[in-house]
Amino acid sequence: MKTLVVFLLLMNVSQHALAVVVEVNEGERYVLLPCQYLGFIPENPTVMWTRSDLNPKSVHVRQEETDDLRGQNQLYSQRTSMRPDALDTGDFSLTLTKPTKTDSSIYTCSISDGTEERRLRDIQLQVKDQQVEVKVEEGSDSVILPCKTTGDLPEDTTVEWTRSDLEQIVVHAYSNRSDLFKKQDNFYCGRTKMNNDLLRTGDLSLTLKYPTERDTGGYICSIYRDNDILRQKVVMNYVRGQCSRNRSEVSIVD
């Protein structure tokens, strides 16, 4: 019996260790929990998002072309959605709006044909309550928006800097794969750069040249590493009325 208990514990730890990690700052409008399925989709399928540490454990259920939220945990009421064509495309990703720290947990994406349930993916969601604030003075030649992670990143790592307060605005993108490279917004063309050895050092900070008051706002550094999605938020504040150049201040805001 002791051997069986130890085996089950090890199996549980192993499943959690293989979970895809998604990080997001508390206060963001939404976070996407990825789940793509390329296998056979049976007739009358049901896609389920669950969280085993809750009762009820149901986070979201999709049947045919409609959602079945009758058994949904009330913590997620009116905060979850899936693509309308999820069962046609196999993209079962879940959008969770207004993430809070209590949403931090492991989520399971599964599919069922009514008789057998298949576990597709575990997602470990980490909702963080910390962001970096950068103050830059008027007239500065440049400002550095910090973003750091562990070094020796895989060659296929993709990094995207986007505006958190402006939808679909790509500030800067890095990828060794041309098919994943996204077009930079014209407003930032020729004004951004990242370190050449960023994969080795894990320093994914962005240098923004000739900052103006229009650059004020939130920035998201998204790191796509293997199957993990890590995000860090930087808020830039532009301080008018100063003549000094090349001066900026970085602080941590809880």
Image (cartoon, helix red, strand yellow):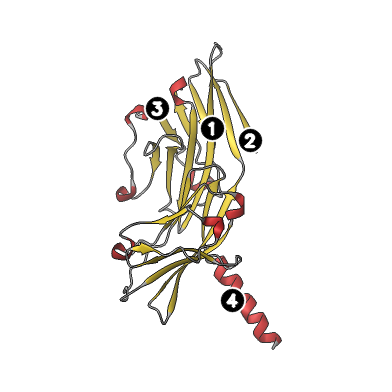
Q: Which residue is mark 1?
A: 235
Q: Secondary structure at mark 4?
A: helix
Looking at the image, do the residues carrying marks 2 and 1 touch, with CB atoms under 8 Å apart?
Answer: yes
**3D distance between C-alphas at marks 3 and 2:** 26 Å
Q: Which residue is mark 3?
A: 191
Q: Name the residue nearer the viewer: 96 or 131.
A: 96
Q: Earlier in the sequence, mark 4 or mark 3?
A: 4
Residue 212, visible in the rendered structure: no
Q: Earlier in the sequence, mark 2 or mark 1?
A: 1
Q: Label 1 neighbourhood size at 10 Å, few (<14), some (14-19), many (20+)?
A: many
Q: Which residue is mark 4?
A: 11
Q: Secondary structure at mark 3?
A: loop
Q: Earlier in the sequence, mark 3 or mark 1?
A: 3
Q: Which residue is mark 2?
A: 253
Q: Earlier in the sequence, mark 4 or mark 2?
A: 4
Residue 108, horizontal then vertical, whole percent: 50, 66
Looking at the image, do the residues carrying marks 3 and 1 touch, with CB atoms under 8 Å apart?
Answer: no
**3D distance between C-alphas at marks 4 and 3:** 49 Å
Q: Name the residue nearer the viewer: 85 or 236.
A: 85
Q: Is residue 37 above or below residue 217?
A: below
Amino acid at circle 3: Arg
Residue 229, horizontal then vertical, whole percent: 48, 53
Amino acid at circle 2: Val
**3D distance between C-alphas at marks 4 and 2:** 38 Å
**3D distance between C-alphas at marks 2 and 1:** 9 Å
| Residue in view at x 45 percent, y 59 percent | 227
Q: Secondary structure at mark 2?
A: strand
| Residue in view at x 48 percent, y 43 percent | 29
In this view, the mark in front (3 or 1):
1
